[in-house]
């Protein structure tokens, strides 16, 4: 009961502190909200890129050449096995029979001579082929996939353009690394801003802290109102950041809809879901408490109270 | 239960730059005892009081307060021991950004008392020191004697087992000083262990039960 009382009083103290000097605190909230807005925007762009990436990037194709004596039943079995693979690995597949292959070859202007003179319906040397469109550019996953397919019955040869796969993978990883790096940088900036805000608050209230310590206040008694004060500021800043990000999304989507007529493929930013918003707030609050803890320890270490 | 509430065993306190505040002091104070610590400025009175409150740590020897050996207690745990001590500071240590009521309630906030109990306890403490009519006054509007009484009210509001007063009568005229000492006499009658430091012995004679005299960090006589 005493603990609930103490928490309740800390919350009231924090609200009163903010309401007493709204302009001073508004500046803090504004700075924090800009940092959160940048963090959220990076998250929104990464999330939207991932959606765009799955429908617009051509992931490597795997060509499965079947044995010459493969029958229709073998092809069906192979198709069943491939369709059982994880959808995260395989988007779809297409079967091209040896007859289809020959027809395509005969229709090709440049190869017409060879196909008509050397190859006939009865002596068709082309194999049945399965073209698998993958859903990933991860070289490790692709090589595992190729190995598994290669071990299947009636599969003669499996080929993939590894060079193309590596390039796609490098590009995706590069974008991911940049996004992660920026997110880490802004999380550090966020921690430092909250840390400094609390440190300044403690220095402003040094007399109160020293007197409280002298008459028996524990670390948690000192830290509690500061933690609530910071959480309250971060929550208000998150709310403001949400509106900023919303505005940013609408603005950017307007630009992208114009570019759609130029480049064909549309890229749309999707807003955070309520769950993602909640998760983000929880993570920010954890970072806030961590920053408050660091700031309080710093002041205790230097104030010797 | 040990009848002694405060025990000093061969205690020395040496500050940085080799400044010796007290040297090899041994003493014990019984529960409910009223003790005066006399001596000139710089004799080591404040250091003895700060060691009891756990504000300072002994360089040598052991300080036991209410069964806790303070030199072996971590700083954070020492704050809990302070919750059972009322300390009247020489410089009052009043918070000037809040009124009398909010100053006095601070120890009760630390102990997590309910709002209802806080109101009752603060009213009682202010009544004890004669400041009941100044509840919502800001500290800068109080006289020196009233500020001292405010500090006393804050020290007694949580009904501590030990009350320590560092030069409570300094900077007060004789009438105010006698009024404060009268207050202490009443607390002592209520069973509180009291340790009061003062450099003017003449004022103590009517109240003293036991006087410990300090000179240059050591007991005198």
Image: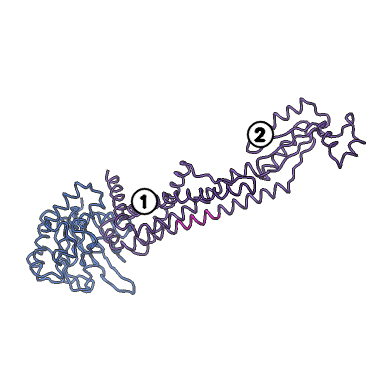
Q: Identify the image quadrant of the C terminus of chain B.
A: bottom left
Q: Residue B34: x and y, percent?
A: 14, 60
Q: Looking at the image, which residue is at 26% across and 53% down?
A: B110
Within-10-Å neighbours for mark 1: few <14, some 14–19, many 20+? some
> Mark 1 highlights which residue?
A232
Name the one closer to the observer, A219 or A90.
A90
Q: Chain of mark 2?
A: A
Q: Secondary structure at mark 1?
A: helix
Within-10-Å neighbours for mark 2: few <14, some 14–19, many 20+? few
Q: How many marks?
A: 2
Q: Which residues are magenta?
A: A181-191
Q: Looking at the image, which residue is at 68% across and 43% down?
A: A59
Q: In the picture, which chain is purple?
A: A
> In which image quadrant can residue B105 be found?
bottom left
| Mark 1–mark 2 distance (CA, rounded to whole Å) | 48 Å
Q: Residue A123: x and y, percent?
A: 89, 31
Q: Same chain, marks 1 and 2?
A: yes
Q: Looking at the image, which residue is at 51% across and 48% down?
A: A250
**Which circle's residue, 1 or 2, is located before the other in the chain?**
2
Q: Secondary structure at mark 2?
A: loop
Q: Residue B206: x and y, percent?
A: 6, 66
Magenta stretch, overall SS: helix
In reply to whether residue A183 is colored magenta, the answer given is yes
In reply to whether residue A109 is colored magenta, the answer given is no
Q: Is residue B73 rendered to the left or right of residue A238?
A: left
Q: Colour of chain B?
A: blue
Q: Looking at the image, which residue is at 21% across and 67% down?
A: B91
Q: Is residue B5 visible?
A: yes
> In which image quadrant can residue A110 be found?
top right
Circle on res. A85: 2
Q: Is residue A305 visible?
A: no
Q: Chain of mark 1?
A: A
């Amino acid at each position: 009961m005493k603990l609930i009382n103490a928490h309740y009083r800390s919350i009231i103290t924090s609200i009163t502190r903010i309401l007493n000097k709204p302009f001073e605190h508004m500046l803090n909230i504004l700075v924090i909200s800009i940092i959160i807005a940048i963090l959220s925007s990076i998250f929104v762009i990464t999330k939207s890129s991932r959606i765009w990436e799955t429908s617009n990037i051509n992931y490597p194709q795997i060509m499965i050449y079947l044995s010459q004596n493969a029958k229709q039943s073998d092809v069906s079995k192979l198709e069943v096995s491939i369709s059982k693979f994880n959808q995260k690995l395989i988007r779809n597949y297409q079967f091209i029979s040896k007859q289809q292959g020959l027809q395509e070859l005969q229709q090709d202007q440049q190869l017409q001579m060879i196909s008509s003179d050397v190859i006939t319906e009865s002596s068709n040397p082309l194999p049945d082929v399965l073209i698998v469109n993958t859903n990933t550019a991860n070289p490790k996953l692709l090589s595992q996939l190729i190995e598994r397919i290669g071990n299947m019955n009636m599969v003669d040869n499996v080929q993939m353009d590894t060079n193309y796969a590596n390039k796609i993978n490098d590009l995706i990883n590069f974008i991911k690394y940049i996004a992660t790096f920026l997110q880490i940088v802004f999380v550090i900036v966020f921690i430092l801003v909250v840390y400094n805000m609390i440190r300044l608050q403690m220095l402003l209230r040094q007399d109160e802290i020293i007197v409280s310590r002298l008459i028996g206040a524990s670390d948690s008694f000192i830290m509690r109102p500061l933690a609530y004060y910071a959480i309250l500021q971060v929550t208000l800043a998150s709310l403001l950041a949400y509106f900023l990000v919303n505005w940013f999304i609408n603005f950017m989507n307007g630009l992208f809809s114009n570019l759609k007529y130029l480049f064909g493929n549309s890229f749309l930013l999707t807003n955070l879901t309520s769950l993602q918003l909640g998760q983000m707030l929880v993570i920010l609050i954890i970072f806030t408490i961590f920053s408050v803890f660091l700031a309080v320890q710093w002041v205790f270490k230097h104030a010797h109270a | 239960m040990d009848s002694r509430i405060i025990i000093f065993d061969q205690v020395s306190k040496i500050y940085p730059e080799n400044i010796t505040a007290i040297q090899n002091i041994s003493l014990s104070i019984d529960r409910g005892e009223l003790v005066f610590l006399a001596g000139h400025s710089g004799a080591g009175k404040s250091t003895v009081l700060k060691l009891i409150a756990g504000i300072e740590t002994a360089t040598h020897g052991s300080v036991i307060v209410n069964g806790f050996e303070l030199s072996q207690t971590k700083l954070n745990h020492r704050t809990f021991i302070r919750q059972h001590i009322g300390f009247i500071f020489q410089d009052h240590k009043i918070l000037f950004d809040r009124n009398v009521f909010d100053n006095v309630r601070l120890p009760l906030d630390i102990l997590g008392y309910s709002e209802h109990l806080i109101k009752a306890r603060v009213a009682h403490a202010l009544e004890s020191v004669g400041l009941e009519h100044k509840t919502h006054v800001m500290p800068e509007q109080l006289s020196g004697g009233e500020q001292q009484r405010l500090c006393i009210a804050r020290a007694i509001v949580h009904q501590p087992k030990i009350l320590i007063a560092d030069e409570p009568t300094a900077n007060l005229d004789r009438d105010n000083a006698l009024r404060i000492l009268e207050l202490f006499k009443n607390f002592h009658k209520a069973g509180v262990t009291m340790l009061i430091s003062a450099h003017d012995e003449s004022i103590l004679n009517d109240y003293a039960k036991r006087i410990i005299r300090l000179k240059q960090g050591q007991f005198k006589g």
